[in-house]
Image: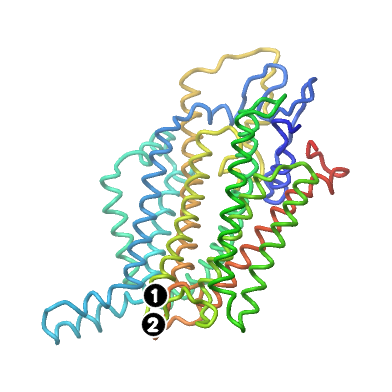
Amino acid sequence: MFHWNEFEPQKKALRTISLFSQAHRRDTCNKIMPSYIDIDTGEESGWRSRLRAIKPRRLTLTRTVYASFLVIAFLVALFLREGLFGFFDNVPFGQDVKNWFLSSVLSRVQGKYAVYRVCFGCFCYYLLFAFLASRLFCVGDRVRLYIQNKWFIVKLPLFTLFMIIPFFIPDVFLYGFAWFSLVMACIFIIVQLIILIDFSFSSAEWFRAKGDDSSYGFWDYLMLAIAFLFYVLAVAFVIVEFVFFGAGADCHLNRFFISFTVVAAVISTIIAMVLKRGIYPTGLIFLYTAFLCWSALTSDPSKACNSLGDFSQQGGTNSTASSIITIVISVLITVFAIVRSAISTGLSFSSFFTMSRHPDDNKSTNNDDDEEVDENDQDDDAKRAECSELFYAHVVFMFSSCYMSCVLANWDILSMQDEQWYVDHSLAAMWVKIATQWVCMGIFGWALIAPKVLKRYRDFDY
C-alpha cells in the first residue's frame, strides 16, 4: 500500500537536479515536516508565512492579465510572420503607392525579423515590470504592488508602444538578440520540463492524499483510470506517428524516434512498477513525450516522411497548427506554474530561481521572549512577498518571450532570409524538440531511480 507521501523521494530528486533542495525535518511520528513548519509550535514561520497572507485571487488575476499580453504578442508575431504580404496584395490602392509601401515599410517587418522585433518588445516590456517589482526600484512595497495591480488601462497602450519601437531598431541588433533568445529558450525548456515532471508526482500525491490510506477507494481508482487514459492517448499518438511519418521506405530516422519513445516508456513503466512508484506519473510523461515526438516529426522538412506537412505554399496550415499547439501547451504549463505558486505551500515557481531560502526563514521563532508581530508589519511582509512573486512571474514571461521567438523562427537564426519558408519546418526545429524529449526522459528517469541509487549519500525519505 502506498502512503500519502510516496512521491516525496521523486520530488526531492527533482530538487537535486534543479538546485533548489530544501531541508526536511521529522517529528516523533516520523512524518515529513517541511522546513518552514516549526517543530515545537507547529506554526509556519518566516517567508512561507508571508506567502500565506497573500491574496491568491488578486495575484492570480494580475498574472493572468500579464499572461494575456504574451498571447497578444504571439498572435501579432504569427500574423506578421505569415499573413501580412498576402493581405496587402489584395488592397485596392494605387500600384505605385503600394510598391513604395511594400519596399520602404514592410521590408522592415517581414518574416523572421518581424518575429524577433515583436518578441524583443515583449521581452523589454516584462523586463520593465520585473524591475518595477524588484527592490532595485527604490520605493515602498505598497507603491510597487500598486503599480503592478493597477493602471492596466495605461499598460495596454504601453505594451503597444513596446511592440512598435523595435521596428525602428537596426537588423544587426536582431541577430544578436536571436542568439540571446536561443540561450534563454533552452533554459526555459529545462525549467518547463522540471515543472511538468514535478507536477506529475505532485498530482499523484494529491490523489493519494484524497484517498483513504488504509484501502483503495474512489480516488485511487480515479487516478488509475486517468493513468490508463494517458497510456491510451500516448499509444494513439504513436500509431498516428507510424502511419504518417514512418511509413516511407527511407524514413528510418523517424521510425527510430518513434521506437525510442515507446521503449523509453516501457522501461520507465517497469522501473516505476518495480520501485512501487505507480503508473500515473509515468503515463503522463509518456503522453507528453509522445506529443513531443509528434511535434518534432511534423517539423521534418522531408516531404517523403512528413505526409501531414503542407509544402505547396509558404506557411503550411498543418505546420502552423503544430507551432500554435506547441506554444499553447508551453504557455499553459507556465501559467499553471506561476498560479500554483500563489495558492500552494508546496513547490512555488520562484523556487526555480532562488538557490536558498529567504534569510528570515533561518531566524528562530522559538525565542524565550515571544513577541507578537504587529498587524501592519505582517501586511508589509505580505506585500513584499507578493511583489517578489510578481517579479518571478515577469522573469518567467521574459523567458517565454524568447522561447516564442525561437519557435516562430524555426529555431534557425543562421539564415535570416525569407526566400521560401515553412513555419516550424526545419531540421533545427525537429532536433530541438527531439532533444527536449530526450532531456525530459532523462530527468524523469533520474527522478525515479535517484532515491534508490543515492539513498546511502542523501536522505530522500525513501
Crowding near the residue tagged with mark 2, few <14, some 14–19, many ≥20 C-alpha atoms within 10 Å: few
Q: Mark 2–mark 1 contact, CB under 8 Å?
A: yes
Name the kind of residue labelled 1 in the image. Gly
Name the kind of residue labelled 2 in the image. Ser
Furthest toward the right, the residue is 456
Residue at disc 2, secondary structure: loop
Q: Where, quadrant-wise, is the N terminus in this rendering?
A: top right
The front one of 16 and 228 is 228
Q: Where, quadrant-wise, is the C terminus in this rendering?
A: top right
Q: Residue at x 48, y 82 (%)?
A: 415
Residue 82: which disc? Answer: none
- Indicate left or right for 108 with 274 as reference: left
The front one of 368 and 289 is 289
Examine the rendered structure and indicate whether residue 229 appears above or below residue 420: above
Q: Which residue is mark 1?
A: 316
List x then y, in percent, for residue 67.
40, 49
Q: Residue at x 44, y 80 (%)?
A: 416
List x then y, in percent, for residue 203.
60, 39
Examine the rendered structure and indicate whether residue 386 appears above or below residue 444: above
Q: Quadrant of residue 456?
A: top right
Q: Which residue is mark 2?
A: 312
Colour mode of the rendering? rainbow
The front one of 82 and 175 is 82
